Image (tube, helix red, strand yellow):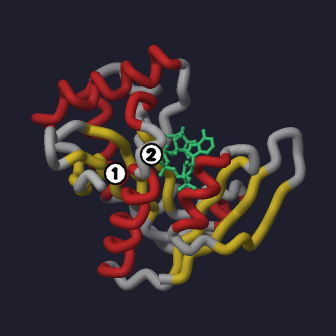
């Protein structure tokens, strides 16, 4: 199994991050775990957005605003390749629960899928959550997204809710 590690995005990571985003665009794949990747016009704008997200305030479960969140790159140790991104919301709000968005969003670049990386990366994020004294995390995924569903279940996810709609969604909780 390849060794992977998590690291926050720095200004010097511009080339890797732009290359990563372009691969999703070329493959027509949605980018999860890197909010702002499609709305920001430059890497600097994206970087500044991620810094702002870290400094957001959490006041209460019922607040409309997003809670603070951290974005991590999942990197492969052997060649330092950026293989995925994870966004960890440090607090849960009613809006995140209602949308089955939960604490963590993630994605693996198309060329690096089906290698166990999403599963390994989620495990590393859960280790961070434990260090932050979080007691549980919630994650949602479309019911038909087998890869994401398995990633969550392999990390201890238990189904807690389900929405039946055109795109059915499942909501999971992992005890830490
Ligand atoms: C979903 C996603 C994160 C999975 O990443 P990955 O690195 O390929 O996942 P893993 O290799 O850790 O696979 C986990 C399990 O799911 C299975 N799996 C992965 N992709 C699959 C697919 N497309 N179809 C069926 N099974 C799949 C793997 O075989 C593995 O199961 P196994 O251990 O029983 O063999 C990736 O496909 C992706 O980034 N998709 C787009 C964004 C997304 O959907 N993010 C999740 C939002 S909730």
Which residue is identified by label 1? 71
Is 46 in front, or is 55? 46
Residue 49 locus on image (x, y percent): 33, 40
**Which residue sits at x=49%, y=73%?**
59
| Mark toward the start of the polypeptide (2 vs 1) | 2
> Is 56 placed left or right of 161 in the picture?
left
**Which residue sits at x=23%, y=46%?**
76
Beta carbon of the mark 1 residue lies under 8 A of ligand 1: no
Q: Which mark is residue 146?
A: none
Which residue is identified by label 2? 33
Asked if residue 128 shows in the view, the reply is: yes
Is 137 in front, or is 108? 108
Q: In 3D space, how far apart are the residues under numbered discs 2 and 1 (Cα atoms)?
A: 7 Å
Q: Is disc 1 surrounded by few (<14), some (14 to 19) or many (20+) residues within 10 Å?
A: many
Residue at the top extreme, as displayed: 26
Disc 2 to disc 1: CB gap under 8 Å: yes
């Amino acid at each position: 199994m390849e060794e992977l590690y998590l690291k926050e995005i720095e200004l010097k990571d511009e080339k890797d991050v732009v290359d990563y985003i372009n691969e999703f665009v070329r493959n027509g794949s949605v980018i999860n775990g890197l909010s702002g990747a499609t709305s920001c016009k430059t890497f600097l704008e994206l970087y500044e957005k991620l810094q702002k997200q870290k400094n957001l305030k959490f006041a209460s479960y019922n607040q409309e605003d997003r809670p603070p969140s951290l974005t991590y790159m999942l990197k492969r140790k052997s060649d330092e390749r950026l293989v995925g991104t994870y966004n960890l919301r440090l607090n849960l709000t009613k809006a995140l629960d209602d949308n089955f968005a939960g604490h963590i969003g993630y994605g693996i670049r198309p060329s690096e899928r089906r290698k166990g990386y999403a599963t390994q990366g989620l495990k590393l994020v859960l280790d961070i959550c434990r260090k932050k004294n979080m007691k549980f995390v919630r994650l949602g995924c479309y019911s038909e997204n087998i890869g994401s569903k398995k990633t969550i279940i392999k990390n201890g996810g238990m189904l807690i809710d389900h929405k039946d709609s055109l795109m059915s969604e499942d909501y999971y909780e992992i005890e830490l």
